[in-house]
Amino acid sequence: MTTTNTHQHAADAILTSLGAADQLAQLHQPVWETPAPLGQRGELPSFPVHTLPAWVAEHISAVAEETQTPLDLAGCVGLAALSTAAGGRAVVNVRGSWIEPVNLFVLVAMPPGSRKSAVFRAMTAPLARAERTLLDRIGPQITEAEVSRRLAADVAEKAARTAGTAHGEAAPDAIAEAQSAALAVEDIKVPVKPRLVADDITPESAASLLVEQGGRLAVLSAEGGIFATLAGRYSGTPNLDLFLKGHAGDPLIIDRRGRTERVDHAALTMGLAVQLEIIADIATMPGFRGKGLLGRILYSLPKSNIGYRRIDPPSVPEQVAARYDANLQQLTIGMHGWDDPARLVLAPEAAEVFTEHRRRTEARLRPDSGDLGHITDWAGKFDGAVMRIAGLLHLAAHVEDAWRHPITTDTVKAAITLGEYFTAHALETFDAMGADPDIEAARTVHAWLHRTGTARFTVREAFTALPRSRFRKVTELEPALDLLEQLGWIRREPDPPRTGPGRRPSPAYAVHPSLHQHAS
């Protein structure tokens, strides 16, 4: 062997001992980009405020600007306010016997300090003023009926005493008079004080109040305490029936004060702004998903702008606030007396647009290929939600006489756009709840990589290390690895060349440096 060859072999040995080849290979690898968070499907859409009638849209935009909050918050609370005004007073005749009420369940999740209460006040204040107006109108009738009832009760009490002491031939007449006086008391009905909105309320109290109000009520709150109450915070037993029936428009029967009361079509609105952790909490509350409550909610997860807010934003213009106030009050007061709900119908062209939308939705529900296949409890109600939104948009566009006009194609398209917004946010929400098995599997692999500080692994090594209860076969691991690679957490290395007979070497992956650099 020549001296040159000897030196070459010595140099190769030194380089091999230092891992020079591996280091050189790493230097030639593509630069790692910042990985996307697990479960994140890209940038979530912002609330499409342009889909709402101008008087609502302008107020939403102005409130969002003044409070320096995302459009989503004011937009969702605005929809809940419209639902409060019209819920139980109108329905959409979709087709045949398919009828959708126009009440909604809307939930916005934002971090603490997001000025949720300020937005709620700005968007719902007209409802409180409408409630006071309704009370002022009916107040004299309440007073008159209460006085009449007290007087009638006095007469009935005297007649009962007389009947109790009557004897002989006078007794039958006295008893008949007492009975008649008692019936007269029952015939005098004292009108109920109008109540549109409740906040922190138990299901039992809400049911009584809803029946008292003719089957209509809204629960609007800048907090999420109602979920803990529904889960049994006070009673120890989950009580979801009111909210399930109140969303669907089902009959509600309750026993109160020794008698049974019933409403044929309960209409409950829910508009909540909660902290982000509530999303994870409600997923674990007994019965919330199994009984279908979670599938009835329209979710919004706006991106926080805390730390980037203007310090001196413009106030809501007076004319914008006044127009919103006047129209929302007019809609609320005008529809409050509708015991038989107004029936809204679709124009023929609008019905065709909606039919095509339903075809697209159906394909998205396929369990093997549809993006909504893993949340059919929510997506199965998606088309109905679109029609509810269309009804509200139509009512807001025709505050005085919406029932005289068919719902137009443009309104249905606007409702579909809003529906797609809520669909994107629902997918993100249910991912956070652990509804997508592929994401949950990817999280398991991600946690193992972080915990062990693994910088490189083969599929065989991962399968051996991970729990068999989670991955029974290697093929069950592949979707998780594919998803992690798509999000940028791992990178598959080129397959090594086959060196002889036998099975192909197990595929290998490099791990994003952020995982093994900060492993605990």
Image (cartoon, helix red, strand yellow):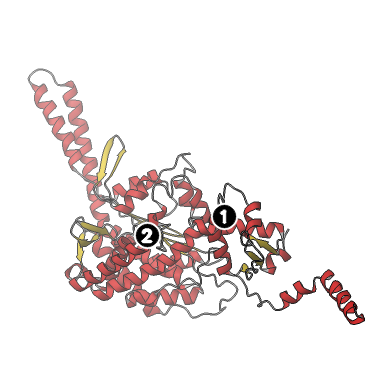
Q: Label 2 amino acid?
A: Arg
- In the image, residue 175 sits, relative to residue 487, either above or below, namely above
Residue 193 seen from this side: no
In the image, residue 95 lies at what x, y percent? 20, 61
Badge 2: residue crowd in 10 Å (few <14, some 14–19, many ≥20): some
Between 376 and 500, the residue placed more toward the observer is 500
Badge 1: residue crowd in 10 Å (few <14, some 14–19, many ≥20): few
Q: Number of labelled discs? A: 2
Gap between marks 2 and 1, in whole Å? 25 Å
Based on the displayed image, in which of its 4 quarters is residue 175 positioned? top left
Q: Are marks 2 and 1 in contact (CB under 8 Å)?
A: no
Lower position in the chain sequence, tag 2 or tag 1: 2
Q: Is 440 situated left or right of 172 in this image? A: right
Residue extending furthest toward the right: 3
Between 178 and 506, the residue placed more toward the observer is 506
Q: Give the label on residue 220, or none.
A: none
Q: Which quadrant would the C terminus be assigned to in this image?
A: bottom right
For the point 52% across and 70% down, the residue is: 303
Based on the displayed image, in which of its 4 quarters is residue 413 positioned? bottom left
In the image, residue 465 lies at what x, y percent? 66, 52
In the image, residue 326 lies at what x, y percent? 31, 72
Q: Label 1 amino acid?
A: Val
Secondary element at image label 1: helix
Q: Give the label on residue 366, or none.
A: 2
Pointer 1: what residue? 474
Secondary element at image label 2: loop
* 2 vs 1, front mark: 1
Between 254 and 122, the residue placed more toward the observer is 254
Residue 496 seen from this side: yes
